[in-house]
Image (cartoon, rainbow, N blue to C red):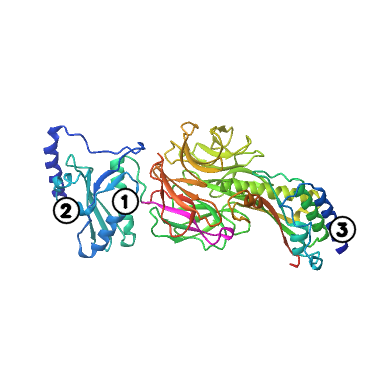
């Protein structure tokens, strides 16, 4: 499994290198910090930091761009390699929509991730979706630098060792 | 006492009838430039010794209701040249004319032999010298003394403006605490003026968007108690709480039908959101929309025949009206920007909404056919309007944005005047105005 994970990591590095324009929203795959080799590849910590637990969306959109699709392919491979793990996909929106609409938009985003992971071969029964609308912002300022971090879908694992 | 009142009334009619005096002064609140009417409200008379403290407090409750509308201005009590000794005696109207009072409220409070509290009042039209409506008495439990003040103010407001009452009502809202990234949200209820706050939920589960049954003291709201956003029903009298609908998926954006028998709401399955009507009881739910768009925020017309809702079926959030049993929907919003969260006025004449345009949120109103659009307020986030029972005042929440911002409750007249903060002990959002209390 460790072998598989490191080849995944290489693939991710290659993809990140080829993806052109730098994007501060990409999961931190490009430069594993010293000591990451010690993170067990079947752990939540590995999934969250090396694979990337989240994807980001454009304003009022639930479309998965190339970066998001790359992240989700890695997530799918990891989930298939760790079949005992289940996941809740949380859909979130930034604060610039109304409460009801953002709940529906968060559901659209979570569902887009769900459909993509299932399309990659993950058992649908292992996945659940929930929308938080604009209720759980990750970044707290009121400008695009924060809004872009809050328009997200996060794959939250259950049943894996934390680290 | 009744005889005394009658005698006074007859004598006054005799002195004024021949002079072709105009009728008592009236306020038209649809006029956005209306000048506040000067009123005199001497501290109510305590008819039993133990009622003195409450008489003063009830006077304050009623006076604050009236002046809070900005339709009335209290003439300071230091200026009063007379002090009524009794509700039953005709006041010295010359003394009230001298300080330019348009109206005089003479009130009295007494403890009844059974322990209840009685408030009686007479409203005088100072210029004509006529009593404006008949003297009236309210009685209620001493514990609910504030409601007696609200009922008195409602009666005065209704007589002078011709509009329906709304002061004797309550607000359910979401009380917020904790940092912006980890807010604790609890349902809370308070009187319309911010008094008597109490919490309805403990903050363990996220709760959103409470809405009142227009016919009873029940609410529907969104709760994450089960891990999924689901519509719950709560009876405020008993505290009983049930999950409303058993369909899998997310249920949200609930609102009661005008007769309180059904709840219209959104259901999301497979990422798609449509509108359903769920009868309370055993009858089956009815699906009202079936589109790949986000169809949400439904609200019944007060006659129950139509539903206004928002949908992005045309590419962006806009308002639509459809028959209450579903069917073809007509778009009614056509201005620039996005329109969301429509709420039909209990009087049927306006639809309030939240509008998003150019990075700002607005509270606005339009006619049910989409005409006469007016924006009443604007800020970083102004959202979630709810109508007073008389359909003439709106409450909503405002959030100015930024890492430390907290939402506050605001109210504004239908005309856009009298924008003011609603006093709450802690930050609040998602207000829902109750029907008038019994």
Q: Which residue lies under the disc numbered 1?
A: B151
Looking at the picture, how far across and down is residue B401, in whole percent?
54, 51
Mark in front: 1 vs 2: 2
Q: Are marks 1 and 2 in contact (CB under 8 Å)?
A: no
Q: Are marks 1 and 3 on the same chain?
A: no
Q: Chain of mark 1?
A: B
Q: Chain of mark 3?
A: A
Q: Nearer the viewer, residue B244 or B383?
A: B383
Q: Which residue lies under the disc numbered 2?
A: B84
Q: Is residue B143 left or right of residue B104?
A: right
Q: Which residue lies under the disc numbered 3?
A: A7
Q: Nearer the viewer, residue B358 or B295?
A: B358
Q: Which residues are magenta?
A: B168-187
Looking at the picture, how far across and down is residue B128, in whole percent?
18, 39
| For residue B432, above or below residue B426 | above
Q: Give the residue at x 58% y 43%.
A: B296
Q: In the structure shown, which secondary structural element does the residue marked by tag 1 occupy?
A: helix
Q: Are marks 1 and 3 in contact (CB under 8 Å)?
A: no
Residue B170 lies within the magenta run = yes
Q: In the structure shown, which secondary structural element does the residue marked by tag 3 occupy?
A: helix
Mark in front: 1 vs 3: 3
Between marks 3 and 2, how big is the CA–CA gap? Answer: 92 Å
């Amino acid at each position: 499994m460790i072998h598989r994970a490191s080849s995944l990591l290489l693939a991710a590095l290659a993809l990140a290198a080829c993806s052109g324009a730098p994007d501060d929203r990409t999961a931190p795959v490009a430069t594993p910090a010293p000591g990451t080799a010690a993170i067990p590849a079947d752990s939540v910590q590995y999934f969250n930091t090396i694979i990337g637990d989240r994807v980001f969306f454009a304003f009022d959109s639930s479309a998965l761009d190339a970066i998001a699709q790359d992240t989700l392919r890695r997530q799918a491979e990891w989930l298939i390699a760790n079949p005992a793990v289940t996941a809740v996909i949380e859909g979130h929106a930034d604060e610039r929509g109304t409460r009801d609409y953002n709940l529906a938009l968060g559901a659209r985003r979570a569902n887009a991730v769900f459909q993509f992971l299932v399309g990659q071969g993950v058992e649908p029964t292992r996945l659940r979706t929930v929308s938080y609308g604009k209720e759980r912002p990750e970044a707290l300022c009121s400008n695009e630098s924060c809004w872009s971090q809050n328009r997200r879908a996060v794959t939250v694992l259950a049943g894996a060792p934390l680290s | 006492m009744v005889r005394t009142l009658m005698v006074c009334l007859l004598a006054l009619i005799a002195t004024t009838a021949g002079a072709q005096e105009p009728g008592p002064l009236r306020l038209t609140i649809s006029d956005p430039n209306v000048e506040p009417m000067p009123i005199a409200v001497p501290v109510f008379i305590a008819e039993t010794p133990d009622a003195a403290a409450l008489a003063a407090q009830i006077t304050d409750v009623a006076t604050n209701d009236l002046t809070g509308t900005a339709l009335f201005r209290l003439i300071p009590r230091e200026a009063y040249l007379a002090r009524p000794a009794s509700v039953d005696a005709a006041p010295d109207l010359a003394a009230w004319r001298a300080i330019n009072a348009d109206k005089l409220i003479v009130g009295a409070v007494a403890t009844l032999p059974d322990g209840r509290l009685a408030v009686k009042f007479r409203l005088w039209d100072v210029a004509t010298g006529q009593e404006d409506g008949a003297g009236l008495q309210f009685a209620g439990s001493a514990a609910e003394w504030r409601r007696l003040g609200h009922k008195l103010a409602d009666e005065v407001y209704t007589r002078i403006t011709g509009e329906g009452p709304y002061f004797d009502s309550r607000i359910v809202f979401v009380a917020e605490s904790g940092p912006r990234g980890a807010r604790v949200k609890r349902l809370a209820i308070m009187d319309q003026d911010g008094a008597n706050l109490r919490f309805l939920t403990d903050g363990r589960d996220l709760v959103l968007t409470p809405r009142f049954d227009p016919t009873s003291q029940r609410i529907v709201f969104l709760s994450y108690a089960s891990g999924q956003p689901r519509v719950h029903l709560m009876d405020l009298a008993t505290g009983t709480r049930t999950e409303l609908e058993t369909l899998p998926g997310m249920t949200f954006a609930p609102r009661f039908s005008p007769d309180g028998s059904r709840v219209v709401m959104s259901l999301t399955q497979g990422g798609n959101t449509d509108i359903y009507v769920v009868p309370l009881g055993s009858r089956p739910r009815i699906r009202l929309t079936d589109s790949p768009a986000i169809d949400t925020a439904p609200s019944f017309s007060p006659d129950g025949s139509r539903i206004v809702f928002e949908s992005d079926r045309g590419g962006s959030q806009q308002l639509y009206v459809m028959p209450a049993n579903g069917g073809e929907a007509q778009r009614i919003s056509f201005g620039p920007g996005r329109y969301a969260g429509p709420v039909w006025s209990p009087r049927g004449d306006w639809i309030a909404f939240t509008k998003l345009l150019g990075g700002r949120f607005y509270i606005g109103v339009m006619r049910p056919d989409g005409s006469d659009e007016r924006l009443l307020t604007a800020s970083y986030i102004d959202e979630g309007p709810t109508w007073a029972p008389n359909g003439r005042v709106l409450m909503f929440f405002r959030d100015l944005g930024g890492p430390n911002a907290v939402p506050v409750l605001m109210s504004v007249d239908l005309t856009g005047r009298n924008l003011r903060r609603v006093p709450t002990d802690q930050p609040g959002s998602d207000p829902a105005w109750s029907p008038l209390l019994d």
